[in-house]
Structures are given as C-alpha cells and as structure tokens.
Amino acid sequence: MSQSFIGIQVRRFLLPAFTVTMLLSGCSSSKPASTESASADSRDERYRSAIEDLNKKRYELATQKLEGLMFSTRATPLEDKVLHSLGQAYFQSKQYLLASEIYRRLLQQTPDSPFVQDAQYQMARSYEKLSPTFELDQEYTVKAINEFRIYLDQYPMQDSERIASDVETYRELLKLKPDNAQYREKYEIAMSELAQQSPARYSMAAIPVLREKLAHNRISVAGHYAQLKKYRAAALYYDEVIAGFSDTAWIEPAWSGKIEMAVKRNKWFEARQAIEQYQLNFPDKRDKVEDTYKKVLRKFSTP
C-alpha cells in the first residue's frame, strides 16, 4: 500500500474529528461565559426587585422572588444577601418558623458572612415569637433561650459606660480637629459598638421572661399529675423547677408542691427535709407549712 494512499486515509479521518473538536471547543469557550454573565445580571436585577418589594412591605412578592433566587445564588456573592433578606421577609410577615429555618441555613452555609451576627439574633427572636402560652408544649421556648444564650456567648455586651464615654470623647475631639482620620475612625468604631448593644440587652431581658414561662409550664404539668393522683410524676416536675429555676417566681410553689407530694406518698423523712429547707428558704412563710410540719413530726414520734 502506497504512502500517499495512507496519507489520504489519515486526513479523511482527522479532518472531521478536528472540525468536531473545534466546534465543541467554540461552544465551551464562548457560550457559557456570556450565558453566565447574563445569568448573573438577571440574578442581580431580580434581587434588587425583591429588595424593593421588601422595603415597601410587599412581603409576599418579596418572598416569592427571593425563594426563586435561593438556589440559583448558591455559592455566589449574593447567597448570604438573599438568605438574610428572605429571613427578614418571613419574619416581617410573621412566618417565624420559616424565618428561623432560613437564618439557620445562613449560619450554616455562609459562616463568614457579615450577616451572621444578625442571623443568630433574629433566629432567637423567631423562636421567641413561636413560644406559646405556658399551658402548651415549650419546645420553642427552650430553643429561644438556647439561641439567645448562644448570641450572648458569641457577642457579649461590652461595657456600655466605657463605650458611651469613648463616643463622647471622640465627638469632642472631632469638633476640634474634624479632619483627623484617626479620631473619625475611633468615633465610628465606638458608635458601631454602642449600636450593637441593643440586641444584647434585648437578649438579656428576654431570657428571664422565657424562663418564667418555662417554670410556670413545669408547675402546671406537676399540678395536672397531682390531680390525677400521680404523685411521683408530679414530684419530679416540682424537683425540676427547684433544681433549674430557683431564679423564678415559681420556686416557692415548687417547694410547696414537693412537700405536699411527699406527704401524699407517706415519704415522711423526705417531707421533713423539704419542710425544713422550705423554712430556711422562705422564713417569712413558715406559718404556711407549720401544721404540715407538726403532722410530719408526729409520724416520727409515733412508735
């Protein structure tokens, strides 16, 4: 077989393959770039439109647009902005469970986002809004307490007096030297720190209120068990309040309930211990348990 014939056959094979390769490379090198650019522009435009709706309190429209962007902006510069805005839209429209889920997603997916601090705070507030009256299940009350505590652990409240003093100091210095860049920077830092005190103060105030509700719930459950004559179960709930909620208004009713349940169960030694501890804790209410104490002591003196 001649070399010219072989060369012709090789060219017949290579030319179509080369043509296909060039076509494919042309498609892969130019089309995705323009498509990606157009897609990014479209996402930006839809996000701006959603924010306009959010600012104008058109929450349903805002959530529809932001939900559509949530997955298409994954791993893009818009991801945390979309999640934060969607969380806001849900919260403002009182869809607190959805809001909490979105804020948690932001914390998990974009931990370096500048919105992380606000997301942690707003997630706690979402659970606080979901917290029901004391008679109902307190799952969201517990979650709210936990998330507020996490917020305070991660973003503790600074010395407000010091910060306020810094603000005043640098404000006065800027009056003397308004063009001093260092004074301006220090003033802005102090102002930012002062502004951040509000969420921390709210968290500190919210936790005791939620704990009062949780203790009230435990007392209520104990009372229901007592009515059903399930005294041991009731005692367990009174003990829970005593062990974990001594800072609430329900600590005295918990000790009273514990004493009553011990007497109902003929646990005289336990009743005596509880009464004596009650008298130490609440000396101004000794009369309340005096008759019960005498009854219990008679059990010890009876042969």
Image: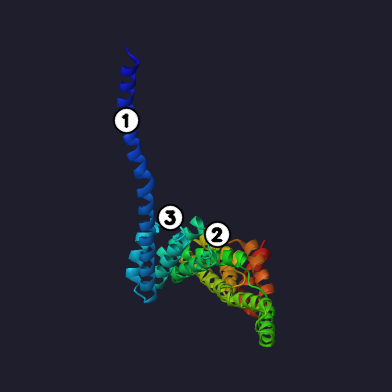
Which circle, 3 or 1, is nearer the viewer?
1
The residue that disc 3 covers is: 74
Which badge, 3 or 1, comes first in the chain's sequence? 1
Side of 101 relative to 167 (left or right): left
The CA span between labels 3 and 1 is 42 Å
The residue depicted at 39 percent of the width and 58 percent of the height is 40
The N terminus - image quarter: top left
The residue that disc 2 covers is: 112
Residue 254 in the image, given as x and y percentages of width and height: 57, 69
Amino acid on which disc 3 is placed: Arg
The C terminus - image quarter: bottom right
Q: Which mark is residue 68?
A: none
Residue 263 in the image, given as x and y percentages of width and height: 58, 65
Question: For this rendering, which residue is in front, 291 or 252?
Answer: 252
Quarter of the view holding residue 21: top left
The residue depicted at 36 percent of the width and 76 percent of the height is 57
Q: Secondary structure at mark 3?
A: loop
The answer to whether one can see residue 163 in this image is yes
Amino acid on which disc 1 is placed: Leu
Q: Secondary structure at mark 2?
A: loop
